[in-house]
Image (cartoon, helix red, strand yellow):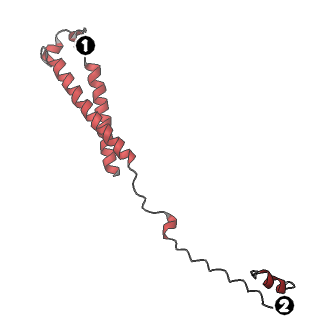
Amino acid sequence: MGILLTIVLVIHILAALGIIGLVLIQHGKGADVGAAFGSGASGSLFGATGSANFLSHATAALAAVFFVTSLGLAYLGSTKPKPAGGVMDSVTTQPVPAPAPAPAPAAGGDKPGAAQDSKANEVPK
């Protein structure tokens, strides 16, 4: 997954730099193309009207690539890889032994109020 993230990130950065370059090369609606390339240079570079069409189509294509790689990076960034395991995953714990039961009290006269306790548990009729 790491190599895919790197590839998408490189394409994303290249598309962003390409968009920046193409937008800076393009001229505004009222600007003269000859001012950017010198007088008459635009006619020899892209043709008389080809510069606006070529640059706008190239910008649109790079914008689409930028949009798709943005979605791809968002998806790859939101999915968390499953952890391979920690250091403590391989440690086995031994069960804790149960505590010994407390000895039961002796029946009979060991307690001073043993006779009274047995009568207290009886239900009157």
Is 75 in front, or is 49?
75
Residue lying at 52% horizontally and 66% vertically, measured from the top left: 88
Whole-Å distance between the Cαs marked 1 and 2?
Answer: 115 Å
42 or 58: nearer the viewer: 58
Badge 2 amino acid: Gly
What residue would you read off at disc 2? Answer: 109
In the rendered image, residue 82, in percent from the top left (x then y), is placed at: 40, 57
Residue furthest right as drawn: 112
Residue at the (49%, 67%) spot, across then down: 89
Q: Is residue 99 above or below residue 7?
A: below
SS of the residue at dot 1? helix
90 displayed left or right of 107: left
Camera-nearest label, 1 or 2: 2
Decide if residue 79 is on the left or right side of residue 32: right
At x 19%, y 8%, the residue is: 39
The image quadrant of residue 66 is top left
Q: Which label number is shown at residue 36?
A: 1
